Image: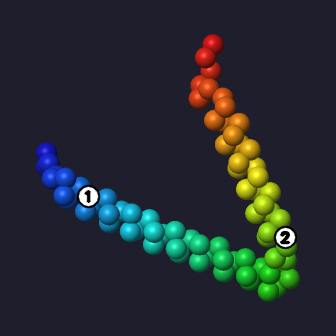
Amino acid sequence: MERYSPTWTEIDLVGKIADLKDDQYRLTLAVSTLMELLVDKGVITKDDISNKASELDTFIHLTQEFSSSQEPYPTE
């Protein structure tokens, strides 16, 4: 079994982070492109996007607040 030095482990981690950043950029670009195309074609409006984003943001914050106030598993 091979053992890696901390230096190689850190280099591997930095590489994985760089890959994740690249993936995030590509996904963000794809979503932005789709939103712009839908707006340009009149399928949705920018207000629709903004309203839905606000709705989802509120839902996520409420869900996080609820889940953090609860036990992570049943205690009984």
Identity of the residue drawn at 23% across and 55% down: 9
Q: Amino acid at mark 1?
A: Glu
Element type at marker 2?
Answer: helix
Q: Nearer the viewer, mark 2 or mark 1?
A: 1
**As drawn, 42 above or below 63:** below
Separation (CA) of disc 2 from disc 1: 43 Å
Foreground of the two, 44 or 56: 56
Structural crowding at the residue carrying mark 2, measured as other residues with C-alpha within 10 Å and reported as few (<14), some (14–19) or many (≥20): few
Q: Position of residue 10 (x, y in %)?
A: 26, 58
Residue 68 occupies which quadrant of the picture? Answer: top right
The earlier-in-sequence mark between 2 and 1 is: 1
Q: Amino acid at mark 2?
A: Asp
Element type at marker 1?
Answer: helix
Q: Is residue 53 visible?
A: yes
Farthest-out residue, top: 76
Label 2 sits on residue: 48
Label 1 sits on residue: 10
Q: Position of residue 52 (x, y in %)?
A: 80, 63
